[in-house]
Image: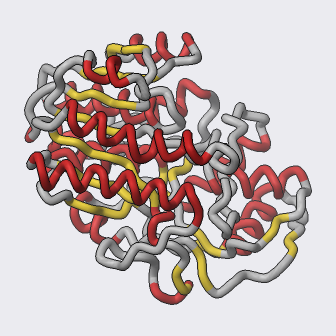
Amino acid sequence: MTDATSSVPEVIRNVVELEELLSRPTQSAIRAMEQVEGDILVLGAAGKMGPTLARMARKASDAAGVRRRVWGVSRFSSGEARRELESQGVETIQGDLLDSKFVDNLPDASNVIYMVGMKFGTTGNEWVTWAVNTWLPSLVSRRYAKSRIVAFSTGNVYGTVPIGCGGSRESDPLRPCGEYAMSCLGRDRMFEYFSHTQGTPTALLRLNYAVETRYGVLVDLARRVYDGVEIELAMGHVNVIWQGDASAMALAALADAASPPWVVNVAGPEILSVREVCQQFGRLFGKPVRMIGWEPSDALLNNGEMGHRRYGPPQVSVEQMMRWIAHWVAAGGPTLDKPTHFEERGGKF
């Protein structure tokens, strides 16, 4: 079994290679699969990050020598996405998670990874956002009261912090800005409530920001540089993490789920200057960079030190991500065509 610490390619040539690389489990993920018992249910398995995590759960379990079922649950609007997961040994279940009867009839599983969320399209549809981000967690928590739950959250719940502080830590006060971030705090509170009242072992992962070659902050910036589009510096600093590393941390966190919940930031170790990232992409592409405005003194930033100490540092560096992404963009590789809008400062998505 090849894991994430194995040698990595100089370039990623196609989606098949990308998916294989993204889903390589780390040693910490494999150890967690040895420690936890029972099957794994991934809710939101067809989202941007869900297929990576579901595949990795299968690979890590196999590498650990543990026989278990891995289910992926989603609406699966793309039949191809569903077939690809099934070809990797992930059993799929199609349905609407906002249907309480559907949730009640999902299979029993000792381990649940919750990846469902609504961000883009929130403005004008706040009522849907709150239902997805806050009401649905209560349905899942009641259905899986006796399971371990790892739930993805977001660093947006912290609000912006000064650049020089090193990023928000898990113990910092929460100051969400806008309906999306407030509903995500509602998600955290629902999982906390049921963890306290039911004793459900839970881990909350506050993510800033997962990146691969088809999606993410670095892809947004690379495409703007490559296309000669002006880059607004409204959010002048950011931290990112390779999507495979973030997925591995989520699997490892299953072994740390607790009541009250274990809370951990999932983020890269560096605070990146957007200006410097764009300049580096300009050098990689051999193109001029057009930036407007000036960097504010604060940004949405997570401090990921606690997670790195617990699960090991990310395996893929920012420099490697940028080289992969630059080659992918220049070669015309496919993207998910879903801008991150990371530069949004008013919380409107």
Q: Residue at x 53, y 29 (%)?
A: 17
The residue closer to the viewer here, 77 or 32, is: 77
The residue closer to the viewer here, 319 or 176, is: 176
Whether residue 120 can be seen here: no
The residue closer to the viewer here, 130 or 165, is: 130
Q: Quadrant of residue 33?
A: top left
Horizontal side of 76 relative to 66 (left or right) equals right
Q: Residue at x 38, y 51 (%)?
A: 187
Q: Residue at x 31, y 57 (%)?
A: 189
Horizontal side of 105 relative to 160 (left or right) equals left
* Picture coordinates of residue 155, whole percent (x, y): 46, 64
* Picture coordinates of residue 51, whole percent (x, y): 45, 29
Seen in the picture, residue 222 relative to 163 is either above or below; the reply is above
Seen in the picture, residue 138 relative to 54 is either above or below; the reply is below
Q: Residue at x 89, y 57 (%)?
A: 229
* Picture coordinates of residue 11, whole percent (x, y): 61, 41
Q: How many marks?
A: 0
* Picture coordinates of residue 68, whole percent (x, y): 16, 21
Horizontal side of 102 relative to 183 (left or right) equals left
Q: Residue furthest front?
A: 127
